[in-house]
Amino acid sequence: MEKTQDGSDGKSKGYVTPAVDRPDAPMPVGSKEPNYNMRHEERGRAIILAYENFSSYGPPRRNCAEHDVEIVTAAFKKLKFTVLTHWDLKTDDLLKVLKQESLEDHSNHDCLVVVLMSHGGVNNNNEEFFYTYDHKLKTSELWTNFTPEKCPTLAGKPKMYFLQACRGEGVDKGVRLQQPRGMRVQTDSMPIEKDYAIPLHADMLIMWASYIGTFAFKSGNNGINGSVFLHFLSKVLSEEGDHHDLSTMLLRVTREVAVCYESYVPGNYRLDMNKQIPYTVSTLMRKVFFNEMK
């Protein structure tokens, strides 16, 4: 017998829907609110997973790691995050850190941020990975512990992941946009509300330094002294975090990486004069403002 979308047979009267196997979690914001509740007692934690050194059979040293951590730490501290930095963790230790964080009580926190700084790539199964000190780990391991059924005190709150790692060995030579000839340019507190359900993978934002399959560059030119993506991310969050929403700021980060940066590797045609653009996947349902009054 065919079923309708609601699971009924379309004919039965008085059919009672069976109980749904659905976990419960505290409601941090009303279902129709356009903005996330950023008025908890604490902003929350920014977990930095920083890699500078790797085992002898791993990738080369990331000599920009210390600088990257410094600028990212400053940016998130300015946004009132508690910043916790972990250096050069082995795979088992990194998994323990993520698991332990998911078990913490985040009831009084607005949100969670995880920043990864490492080398990365794609394996033979076309799965993205990043390097730990002693191994490789699928990128998805960074957020798998923070879905609502595993971390209920972050349910309905934004969980943001920023990934500085290559996503392959492809390059992007870009395209030159030229002005058409003859064209003139012009210049100029939460109310009482009934319960509601959300998907397990709601309220997440993942922003990679580069597009799928491509390099994420570092630079020592034009005021940049480390990872290009983290330079512009830190710059924009520091400059605009007190008056713009997150989506608006990340649009600027994407634009500035894409427009303001071009790789400079003289003598190496493949790596010279390449462009880079961050890549964002979001299931956020509301706007994130870091300037909410407590």
Image (cartoon, rainbow, N blue to C red):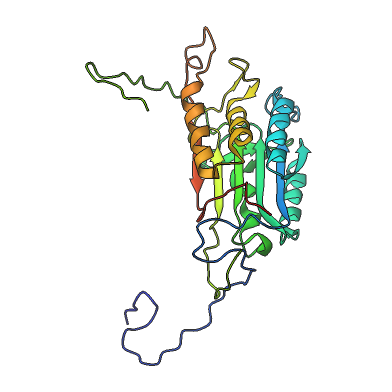
Report whether residue 57 is seen: no
Report whether residue 252 is seen: yes
| 234 over 109 or under it: above or below | above
| 14 over 255 or under it: above or below | below
Q: Please give the name of the residue rendered at 49% of the width and 64% of the height, measured from the top-left corner.
A: 32
Image side of residue 212 versus residue 180, left or right: right
Quarter of the picture holding the C terminus: bottom right
| 263 over 227 or under it: above or below | above
Image side of residue 4 versus residue 73, left or right: left
Q: Please give the name of the residue rendered at 52% of the width and 7% of the height, measured from the top-left corner.
A: 267
Q: Quadrant of residue 209?
A: top right
Q: Nearer the viewer, residue 277 or 137?
A: 277
Count the marks: 0
Q: Quadrant of residue 100?
A: bottom right
Q: Nearer the viewer, residue 25 or 165?
A: 25
| 286 over 17 or under it: above or below | above
Point out residue 288 in the picture as x, y percentages from the top left corner: 56, 50
Point out residue 192 in the picture as x, y percentages from the top left corner: 58, 73
Q: Nearer the viewer, residue 169 or 102?
A: 102
